[in-house]
Image (cartoon, rainbow, N blue to C red):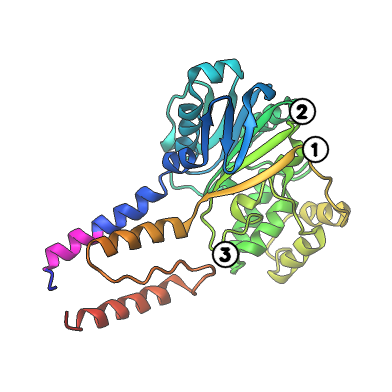
Amino acid sequence: MQRSGEQLRGDGMTIWRAGVEAVDPRRLVRQALCVEGGDVIVGEERIRLDQIGRIAVVGAGKAGAGMAAAVEEVLGPERMERKRLAGWVNVPEDTLRPLSHIRLHGARPAAVNEPTAAGVAGTVEILKIVASLQPQDLCLCLISGGGSALMPSPAEGITLADKLAVTRHLSGAGANIEELNVVRKQLSRVKGGGLARACRAGRLISLIISDVLGDPLEVIASGPTVADSSTPRQALSVLEQYHAREAGIADRVFDFLRNKGDQAASKPTARVSNLIIGNNATAVDAAGEEAVRLGYSPAMISARRSDGPAEEVGRHLAALALSMRSQPG
C-alpha cells in the first residue's frame, strides 16, 4: 500500500507516541505497584500492610515526579496517613509539582546534567529519612535516568567541586559510562549501594526505570541500592588511564582512594530488591506493535550495548530509510 508523505509523517508520530506512552512513569509504577485487599504488591512480592510500620519513599531521577505521584495515587490518602508515609525525591527543577506526602526537591536546573549544591542538600535529607527507619518499615526507592547527577553525596574529605572536576575530565577524555561510574561510586556516600547500606528499614525495594542499554543495575544512577563490586584500586586505574593528575585533579582525590583500601563494603541490614519496571525495550516493543497495527513490518530490536558513535548510527539509519523508500510496495 502506497502512503503519501503526509500519511507517513502522521504514522511516524503515532508510532513514536506509542513508544513514549509505554514508558510513562506513572503508568510503569501503577503496573508494578498495587494494593489488593490487605496487601501491597510490588512486582511479584506481596507484603501484608498490617506488618508494615511506616512507609518511606526516596529516590532521584528525571522521571521521579511522575513516579512519586503514582505511588501516592496507588496507596491513597487513608493508607498514606495510617502508614505515616513520608518521602523525598530529587528531581529537575522543571518537573516540580505539589504532592501530599512526598517532597519533590529541585536538585538541578532543567537541562543541566551535573550535580549541584542543591542536589547535595537534597541527598542529605534522603539519608536522614532512610536512617530514621526501623526494621518493621518499608522503604520504596524510585530511580530513573539522571539519578546519578541528581543524588550526589561526596565522600567525607571530597568536595562537590572535586567530583565535578573528575566527571568533567573523564567525560571529556572519552571515558565510557562504566569507567565513569567506577570512579563516581568510590567517591560517593550513596552510589554503589551506599543508600542501601544507610537504610535501616527491614525492606528496601527499588523501582527502576532504566536509561542504560542492557539494564546493568550497578550502572543505572550508579547503583545506589545495588551491591558494588568495584574497588578503589580500579578507580585509581581509571584516573591514571585518562591522565587525571596531569589534568589538575586534586591530590586529595588520589589520597582518598589510596587510603580507602580494597576492603569489601559492608552489607546492608535491609532486605533489598531491585526491580526494572521499564526500559528502552519497553518503548521499542510498544512502538513496534503500533507499527504493525498500522500495517507496517517493523524490525523491533532494542540494542543491549552501544552500536557506536551517534553520528555513525544516524548515517546508517538514514541510508536504510532511503533504501527502503526506493523499494516498491
Which of the image's four quarters has the C terminus?
Answer: bottom left
Cα–Cα gap, marks 2 and 1: 9 Å
2 and 1 marks in contact (CB < 8 Å)? yes
Which quadrant holds residue 97? Answer: top left
Of residue 155 and residue 318, the one placed in the foreground of this image is 318
Which quadrant holds residue 132? Answer: top right
Residue drawn at x 68%, y 69% is: 242
Vertical side of 300 occupied by 91: above or below: above
Residue drawn at x 41%, y 74% is: 313
**Label disc, if present, on residue 172 of the rendered structure:** 3
Q: How many marks?
A: 3
Residue at the spot of label 2: 135
Cα–Cα gap, marks 3 and 1: 38 Å
3 and 1 marks in contact (CB < 8 Å)? no
Which of the image's four quarters has the N terminus?
Answer: bottom left
**Label disc, if present, on residue 269 of the rendered structure:** 1
Residue 259's x, y, as percent? Answer: 88, 53
Prevalent SS, magenta region = helix
Residue drawn at x 71%, y 52% is: 185
Q: Which residues are magenta?
A: 4-12
Q: Circle 2 — which element?
A: loop
